[in-house]
Amino acid sequence: MLKWALIFAVIALVAGALGFGGVAGAAAGIAKILFFLFLAIFVVFLVLGIVAGRKITGG
């Protein structure tokens, strides 16, 4: 998912440099949504990993 966010960010930069404002804005919006979705899922899995690790080690 982070890979797709980076791809859309690059598309937004290239489209913006070439003067395609609408395409650049849409691609930047998609990249932002994908990045924050990735970040939320990462935090959820990080918390689950910490909780599971504590249960396995007994701490």
Image (cartoon, helix red, strand yellow):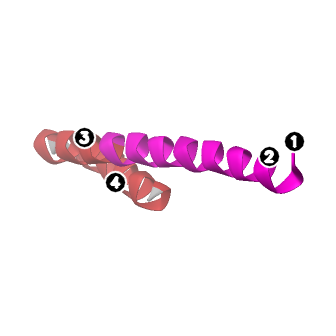
Identify which residue is drawn at 28% across, 41% down.
28
**Mark found first going from the N terminus, 4 or 2:** 4
**Mark found first going from the N terminus, 1 or 4:** 4
Q: Label for residue 8? A: 4
Residue that mark 2 sits on: 54
x and y percent of residue 19 in the render? 18, 42
Q: Label for residue 59? A: 1
Identify which residue is drawn at 58% across, 50% down.
45
Mark 1 near mark 2, Cβ–Cβ under 8 Å?
yes
Q: Nearer the viewer, mark 2 or mark 3?
A: 2
**Mark found first going from the N terminus, 1 or 2:** 2
State which quarter of the image contains the N terminus.
bottom left
x and y percent of residue 21 in the render? 15, 39
Q: Amino acid at mark 2?
A: Arg
Residue that sits furthest to the left in the current view: 22
Q: Amino acid at mark 3?
A: Gly
Q: Which residue range is magenta in the image? A: 32-59
